[in-house]
Image (cartoon, rainbow, N blue to C red):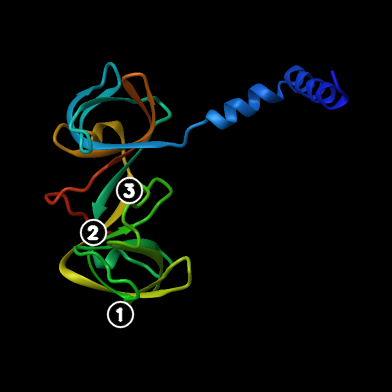
Amino acid sequence: MNLTKKATLILVLGAIALGVVPFAAQAAGAKKNQHVNGAVTAVDTTANTVTILDKKTSSTITVSVSPDTKFTESKNVGLEGLAVGDRIRATAKEDLIAGVTTVDATRIEILSPLSEPAKHVGKKSVEGSIVTLAPNLTISSDDGTTYTINTAPKVQVLASFPATFSDVVVGKHIQAIGKLDGTTFEASAIVVAATKEHHTKAI
């Protein structure tokens, strides 16, 4: 065995002895939070589970709830619920034209750490912090671009509020954040989606 191979073997054995290799393998295999969305079809408060019809796959998913699961509910707060400094996502009905900095928004979300990552930022939506509310709603994106947000008459302005397991009922839509363990999705957080019948304005 030459000196290079011998030195490499010593380093590997040393790493195994110190537990570095298993730790690195575990870190490499670690998964980011996953998201599932769908309509609630059943709630079992005894087993602490929620059954949803997954929006993406049209399959049934069992979501497991633990004492550590955080609940929030998204509600329509109206334009008066916006404030300078809020980070928002403005979504348009049609694809955005490259280079255009005016967005005709049909939906605005006040973002929180639990907000689902956007799939269409740069295509149908833009994100940024509110700079002005009047005479125009403007935001500054992460790359420094200023966008003017035009709002439709029935624009939804969604914000997150504290909620509990009891707010999860059949018929409502939820977003679960967590990880899939076998056939059960273990939720670290659940967001109850806003409904057209439940519009609550900020006080």
Q: Quadrant of residue 179?
A: top left
Horizontally, residue 192 falls left or right of residue 152, namely right
- Residue 19 placement (x, y as % from top left): 71, 21
Number of numbered tags placed on the structure image = 3
Q: Residue at x 68, y 24 (%)?
A: 21
C-alpha span from label 1 to label 2: 21 Å
Q: Quadrant of the N terminus?
A: top right
Q: Would you name the residue on which mark 2 appears?
A: 201
- Residue 200 placement (x, y as % from top left): 21, 54
Amino acid type assigned to the residue bearing label 2 in the image: Lys
- Residue 5 placement (x, y as % from top left): 81, 23
User: Would you say the residues marked 1 and 2 are in contact, meaning their CB atoms lie under 8 Å apart?
Assistant: no
Give whichever of discs 3 and 1 has the lower sequence position: 1
Horizontally, residue 50 falls left or right of residue 177, namely left
Amino acid type assigned to the residue bearing label 1 in the image: Asn
Q: Give the class, few, some or many, for how many residues have Cα within 10 Å of label 3's Cα (few <14, many ≥20).
A: few
Q: For residue 136, which numbered disc appears in the image?
A: 1
Q: For residue 161, which numbered disc appears in the image?
A: 3
Instruction: Give SS at disc 2.
Output: loop
Say which of marks 3 and 1 sits in front: 1
Q: Residue at x 24, y 45 (%)?
A: 193
Give whichever of discs 1 and 2 has the lower sequence position: 1
Q: Give the class, few, some or many, for how many residues have Cα within 10 Å of label 1's Cα (few <14, many ≥20).
A: few
C-alpha span from label 3 to label 1: 26 Å
Instruction: Give SS at disc 1.
Output: loop
Amino acid type assigned to the residue bearing label 3 in the image: Phe
Query: Taking 24 as reference, is 79 above or below it?
Result: below
